[in-house]
Image (spheres, grey):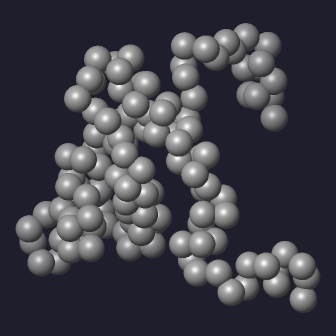
Amino acid sequence: MSELTSLLIHKTEVELFEEFWDGDTFDLVINQSNLYAQQQNCHEFSLKKQQLKRCLGFMLFSGYDRLPRERMYWEKADDCRVNIVSQALSRQEYMDIKRNLHLADNTTRVISSTNFVDICSC
């Protein structure tokens, strides 16, 4: 058994996730998302760590348990509503987070046309 396998084999799914998404990563995403919301004049938006975790959890879950439309997870119909989702996160809260989710400050990034050409010429 490799050293990496022996380090990870006894971890829970959440602990494995947190190996990649540590506190610094959450802080970066929260800060950049809140900054983006402010830049878009959405001053009432203030993302918290627990909200981000629930949103990411929903995104992972919805990749496994697929419905035709995203909004169906919160519908009242028995064949659509997913209680674990609707109890963890309101539809509006999810939509607000999704709309403002950012990983970098758009105002400080400069992309030259040559960089774009390099990306597109793969």
Q: Position of residue 67 (x, y in %)?
A: 31, 67
The residue most toward the right is 2
Image quarter where the C terminus lies is top right
Can residue 80 be seen in this snapshot? no
**Whole-percent x and y of residue 82?**
23, 73
Where does the N terminus fall, quadrant-wise?
bottom right
Location of residue 32 with respect to 47 vertically, above or below: above
Q: Is residue 46 left or right of residue 22?
A: left
List the single residue furthest toward the front.
Answer: 23
Residue 96 found in image quarter? top left
User: Visible in this render: residue 13?
Assistant: yes
Tell me which residue sits at (40%, 31%) in the image: 34
Q: Residue at x 73, y 10 (%)?
A: 112
Residue positioned 36% across, 41% down in the render: 47
Extreme residue in the left direction: 76
Q: How many numbered discs sit on the rendered protein?
A: 0
Q: Quadrant of residue 120?
A: top right
- Above-or-below relation of 93 to 122: below
- Looking at the picture, does residue 112 appear above or below residue 83? above
User: Horizontal and vertical percent for residue 39?
Assistant: 38, 17
User: Residue drawn 35% across and 21% down?
Assistant: 38
Residue 3's x, y, as percent?
A: 89, 79
Quadrant for residue 74, please give it: bottom left
